[in-house]
Image: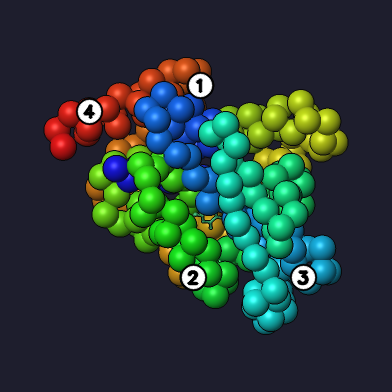
Amino acid sequence: MKVAIDGPAGAGKSTIARAAAKMLGFIYIDTGAMYRAVGLYAWRRGVDTKNDTEGVVRLLPEIEVTISHVDGVQRVFLCGEDVSEEIRLPEISVAASNVAVIPEVRLKLVELQRALSEKTDVIMDGRDIGTYVLPDAEVKIFLTADVRKRAERRYLELAEKGVSTTLEEVLSDMEYRDKNDSGRAFAPLRQAEDAVLVDTSFNTPDESISEVVNIIRGKQNVL
Ligand code: DC
């Protein structure tokens, strides 16, 4: 079974998808981490990810992104180096959103995402999973929340990790990414016609997890 969970940054996709996958015995695949790995590579090489599309495309043949799962937790490797922590830095969030606009980057990563979904039951989260990567997914969920709530959650997450930032900075990065991710021409962020909308603005994480698990179990029962 394939489950697609899409939505903007900070809606709770990864927390909910990871927990649901554990409860249901599915593999969780975080596709954002792959765009972050490409963003990190370009950022390390000093390429201006916003304006220098050609510079990013030129790097692509050198970039090898792979993932593996350790106790159900996804780790991301960039040319063999485990970059799972470093890709979470705020500057890499913006670089990821920038490189994700480039069709050549998307096509490279979509190939990997589709191949991973062939092997086992998956819950995959991202921006274009239900609309582009896995259009035949049996369950599609569009997870969203008010932008201020999303920024507050991301800010607390970063503060817990000791990353120095402000709520205003996180909010402004999030608004930038929302616009970039929804406004791009190729596979933009949007709700698939056959996706169920889940708004997590006023939910606890446990409430959102139950809602998503119930949607998936409901579908499993009729298949
Ligand atoms: O889910 P995330 O915040 O880790 O994703 C980082 C960026 O990657 C996000 O701003 C847009 C991009 N992305 C994408 O374009 N398509 C996906 N399927 C997943 C992420």
Describe the element under mark 1 as helix, strand or loop.
helix
Closer mark to the observer between disc 1 and disc 2:
2
**Residue type, numbered disc 3:** Asp
Dividing the picture into quarters, in which one does residue 10 lie?
A: top right
Residue at the (74%, 42%) spot, across then down:
85
Distance CA(mark 4)–CA(mark 2): 32 Å
Q: Label 1 to label 2, Cα distance in Å?
A: 32 Å
Location of mark 4 (residue)? 218
Find out whether the residues at labels 3 and 2 contact each other: C-beta distance under 8 Å: no
Instruction: Tell me if label 4 and label 2 are in contact, CB under 8 Å.
Output: no
Q: Position of residue 138 (x, y in %)?
A: 25, 45
Q: Position of residue 78 (x, y in %)?
A: 70, 58
Q: Earlier in the sequence, mark 3 or mark 1?
A: 3
Mark 4 or mark 1, earlier in chain: 1
Residue at numbered disc 2:
107
Q: Amino acid at mark 2?
A: Leu
The image's mark for residue 48 is 3
Evaluate whether residue 40 shows in this view.
yes
Badge nearest the viewer, 3 or 4: 4
Q: Secondary structure at mark 4?
A: helix
3 or 2: tag closer to the N-terminus: 3
Tag on residue 205?
1
